[in-house]
């Protein structure tokens, strides 16, 4: 029976969703289902303080061939949804892998087969649904960029002039060109850097000499905006670029924030 106080429509909705998932059979392999319902608090006497919610979680295991509890661990993964809302995942174990779901099953691909190359992965899909991945090549401390087209996977070295430390953030612009925010070693705190590719090749800029844990976004004009942690000042900061160059603002410096 539905819990006391549960609204009929919400309970019926939860039951309908559960039956729909169970009817999928093998279409959703290795899944678990849980229905969470929140009911009004009788002690408060006010039904408006609590909404009746029904939520469904479906858990799948895309890659059962890897043992991620052993060294090296799977430390980084990046998720993107295509135009049909199917999931695509880039992840690292001993190599760089890419998994995608077509609505019925998972497909697994090895992007970079060199051992231990990929950490700090970031995945983006272009307008055709093709994957693009930025990552840290641990074996050479380089910033790498991989993309797939009709002929297969292609890998480019973006920055090999400095020691890449951690964190890559990849975004594609309206023309499908990659833009990457990342961090390199440097004195005293390391460098926050920005790389982008156009018809002439890759271009690399240093945003600041004290920044990591970056997250990159592009505005409607294709200008980069980066949030990051200022290691030297223990602050969350925001950098953006326009016609006059890079500009930096402090967002929060109350304690050790933004990492």
Image (tube, rainbow, N blue to C red):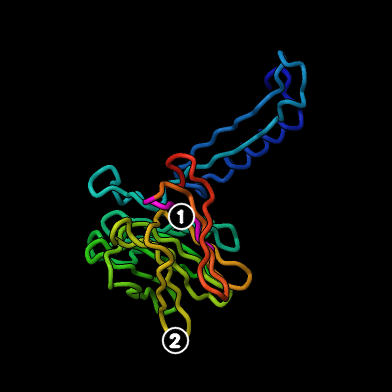
**Mark 1 falls on what kind of element?**
strand
Tags 2 and 1 touching, CB below 8 Å:
no
Instruction: Give the residue furthest to the top.
Output: 43
Residue 240 visible to an observer of this rendering: yes
Total number of numbered discs in the rendering: 2
Which mark sits nearer the N-terminus, 2 or 1? 2
- What residue does disc 1 label? 228
Q: Is residue 41 above or below residue 56?
A: above
Q: Where is residue 45 in the image (x, y as percent from the top left)?
A: 76, 16
Q: Which of 56 and 49 is in front in this view?
A: 49
Residue 182: quadrant of the picture: bottom left
Taking the image as shown, residue 147 lies to the left or right of residue 128, namely left
- What residue does disc 2 label? 200
Q: Where is residue 193 in the image (x, y as percent from the top left)?
A: 40, 66
Q: Residues within 10 Å of mark 1 (few under 14, many from 20)?
A: many
Residue shown at the point (53%, 44%) measured from the top left:
25
Q: Which of 121 and 185 is in front in this view?
A: 185
Q: Judge whether residue 70 is colored magenta.
A: no
Residue 257: quadrant of the picture: top left
The region drawn magenta spans 225-232
Instruction: Give the residue furthest to the bottom.
Output: 200
Residue 56: quadrant of the picture: top right
């Amino acid at each position: 029976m539905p819990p006391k106080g549960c609204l009929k429509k919400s309970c019926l909705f939860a039951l309908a969703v559960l039956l729909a998932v169970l009817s999928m059979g093998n279409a959703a392999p290795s899944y678990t289902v849980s229905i969470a319902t929140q009911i009004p608090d009788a002690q408060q006497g006010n039904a408006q303080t609590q909404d009746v919610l029904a939520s469904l979680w479906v858990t799948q295991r895309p890659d059962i061939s890897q043992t991620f509890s052993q060294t090296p661990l799977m430390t980084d993964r990046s998720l993107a949804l295509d135009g049909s809302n199917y999931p695509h995942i880039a992840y690292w174990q001993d190599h760089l892998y890419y998994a995608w779901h077509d609505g019925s099953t998972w497909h697994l691909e090895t992007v970079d087969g060199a051992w231990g190359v990929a950490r700090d992965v970031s995945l983006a899909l272009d307008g055709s649904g093709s994957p693009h991945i930025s990552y840290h090549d641990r074996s050479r401390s380089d910033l790498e960029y991989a993309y797939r087209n009709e002929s297969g996977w292609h890998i480019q070295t973006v920055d090999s002039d400095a020691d890449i430390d951690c964190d890559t953030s990849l975004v594609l612009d309206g023309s499908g060109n990659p833009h990457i925010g990342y961090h390199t070693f440097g004195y005293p705190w390391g460098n926050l850097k920005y790389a982008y590719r156009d018809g002439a090749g890759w271009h690399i800029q240093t945003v600041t000499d004290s920044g990591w844990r970056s997250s990159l976004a592009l505005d409607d004009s294709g200008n980069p905006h980066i949030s990051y942690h200022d290691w030297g000042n223990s602050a969350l900061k925001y950098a953006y670029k326009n016609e006059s160059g890079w500009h930096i603002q402090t967002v929060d410096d109350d304690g050790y924030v933004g990492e």
